[in-house]
């Protein structure tokens, strides 16, 4: 009988200033993850570069590449060799002057399944992404890979229940979130640090519960400029229980077993999808509801 359990891995790493070194390091980590049994491997957001969105500058546009392109070709060969599915977040150059924050998905035979372009683009101190990225225009996507049907959302998308809902409604069994989030490096209040991280985690656990899906967030670590990335990559089950979690300061590969049969169990016991009053939600398309 075909097993419904799939081992996934999240790569939590520091970033070098050299994109080629980051790609090479990611390939080594993918090999290690595959050797230890991972079938689906997710890299952190913008894994080939340091997080350049802390400032508005023109030089980082030189990091952008086409998708499919040079990095995805390397990863396709690796996926084919190791028979693993890869989720790879890259800086996409769509056309001259048009760029996206994009995740490519590669199947276990090395085929390029497609991409998801980040829909929600932040513009906050230290996260000036609107300067670099055009909002996604591909909608919310799922990918039927050899081992599971997966959805991919990216970092700031984590805060939007609508994005997780639509991805789940399209059939995602596991939602992956490549991520780059952290504290201001000069933030000294442990209470502030704890509350920020707890809010980030709670929001994603709620997506798992509300939709009856596995959620997997792959964050980076290390201090880059004025940001201290908080790691804590994690995987939770469809009832929001954390299966595995990484430390906040360590480079690591986080492994978790996801038993997809549990999706039906949780959804039948907590039938949130059954009881949705879809005919009442039209106003969600409004920016704000004035009285």
Image (cartoon, helix red, strand yellow):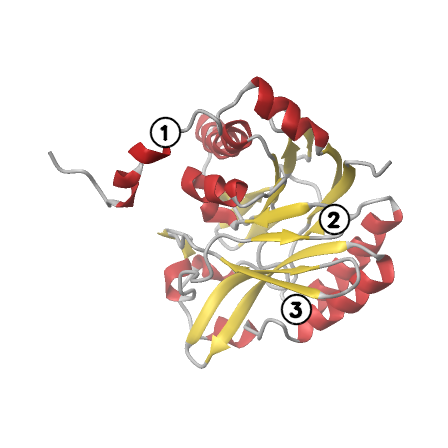
**Quadrant for the N terminus in the image:** top right
How far is mark 1 from mark 2, CA to CA? 34 Å
Q: Callout 3 environment at 10 Å: few (<14), some (14 to 19), or many (20+)?
A: few
Which of label 3 and label 2 is nearer to you?
2
CB-based contact (under 8 Å), mark 3 and mark 2: no
Which of the 4 image quarters holds residue 110?
Answer: bottom right
Which of the 4 image quarters holds residue 90?
Answer: bottom right
Q: Which of marks 1 and 3 precedes in the sequence?
A: 3
How far is mark 3 from mark 2, CA to CA? 26 Å
Which residue carries the number 3 mark?
Answer: 18
Q: Is residue 52 above or below residue 67?
A: above
Q: Residue at x 64, y 75 (%)?
A: 69
Seen in the image, is 10 located left or right of residue 231? Answer: right
Residue 45 in the image: state x and y as whole percent: 58, 54
How far is mark 3 from mark 1, CA to CA? 50 Å
Which residue carries the number 2 mark?
Answer: 40
25 and 174: which is toward the camera = 174
Q: Is residue 33 above or below residue 205?
A: below
Which residue carries the number 1 mark?
Answer: 277
Residue 195 in the image: state x and y as whole percent: 46, 28
Q: Please indicate, yes or no, whether residue 220 appears anywhere in the rendered image.
A: no
Seen in the image, is 71 located left or right of residue 225? Answer: right
Q: Secondary structure at mark 3?
A: loop
């Amino acid at each position: 009988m075909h097993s419904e359990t799939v081992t996934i891995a999240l790569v939590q790493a520091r970033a070098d200033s050299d994109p080629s070194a980051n790609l090479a390091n990611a390939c080594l980590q993918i090999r290690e993850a595959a050797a230890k049994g991972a079938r689906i491997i997710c890299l952190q957001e913008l894994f080939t570069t340091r997080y350049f969105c802390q400032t508005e500058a023109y030089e980082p546009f030189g990091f952008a590449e086409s998708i499919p392109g040079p990095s995805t070709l390397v990863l396709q060969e690796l996926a084919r060799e190791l028979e693993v599915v890869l989720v790879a977040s890259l800086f996409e150059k769509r056309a001259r002057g048009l760029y996206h924050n994009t995740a490519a998905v590669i199947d276990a035979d090395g085929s390029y399944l497609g991409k998801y372009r980040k829909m929600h683009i932040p513009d906050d101190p230290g996260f000036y992404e609107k300067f670099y990225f055009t909002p996604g225009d591909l909608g919310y996507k799922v990918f039927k890979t050899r081992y599971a049907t997966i959805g991919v959302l990216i970092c700031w998308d984590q805060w939007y229940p609508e994005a997780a809902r639509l991805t789940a409604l399209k059939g995602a069994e596991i939602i992956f979130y490549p991520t780059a989030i952290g504290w201001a490096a000069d933030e000294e209040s442990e209470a502030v640090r704890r509350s920020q991280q707890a809010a980030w985690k709670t929001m994603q656990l709620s997506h798992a519960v509300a939709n009856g899906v596995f959620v997997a967030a792959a964050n980076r670590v290390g201090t880059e400029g004025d940001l201290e990335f908080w790691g804590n990559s994690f995987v939770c089950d469809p009832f929001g229980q954390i299966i595995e979690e990484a430390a906040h300061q360590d480079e690591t590969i986080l492994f978790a077993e996801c038993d997809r049969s549990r999706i039906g169990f949780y959804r039948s016991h907590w039938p949130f999808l059954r009881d949705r009053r879809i005919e009442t939600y039209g106003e969600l398309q409004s920016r704000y509801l004035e009285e």
